[in-house]
Image (tube, grey):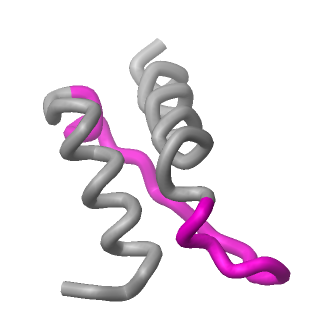
């Protein structure tokens, strides 16, 4: 149940925000941890986008 919630939350963050930061033709592996459920959704989207762009 927790795994599915993490997966749904990450999928929605990618769909609504981070997909624009993904380069066409590349594969991405996103490892979801239970901590994803504890942070605000806006922060999750921003962090995911930042990591996909490769910035610190």
Left or right? Give the position of 28 relative to 48: right
Query: Which residue is found at the position 28% from the left and 45% from the top?
Result: 44
Answer whether residue 26 is magenta in the image.
Answer: yes
Residue 9 position in % (x across, y down): 45, 30
Residue 24 position in % (x across, y down): 79, 78
In the depicted structure, whether residue 21 falls above or below residue 39? below
Name the one closer to the observer, 53 or 4.
Answer: 53
In the depicted structure, whether residue 13 falls above or below residue 2? below
Give the residue furthest to the right: 25
Q: Quadrant of the C terminus?
A: bottom left
Answer whether residue 28 is magenta in the image.
Answer: yes
Query: Which residue is found at the position 42% from the left and 81% from the top?
Result: 53
Query: Which residue is found at the position 54% from the left and 70% from the top?
Result: 21
Magenta stretch bounds: 20-37
Q: Main secondary structure of the magenta part?
A: loop
Left or right? Give the position of 46 relative to 48: left
Left or right? Give the position of 22 relative to 41: right
């Amino acid at each position: 149940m927790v795994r599915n919630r993490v997966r749904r939350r990450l999928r929605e963050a990618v769909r609504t925000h981070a997909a624009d930061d993904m380069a066409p033709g590349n594969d991405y592996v996103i490892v979801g941890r239970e901590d994803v459920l504890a942070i605000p959704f806006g922060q999750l989207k921003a962090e995911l986008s930042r990591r996909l762009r490769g910035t610190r």
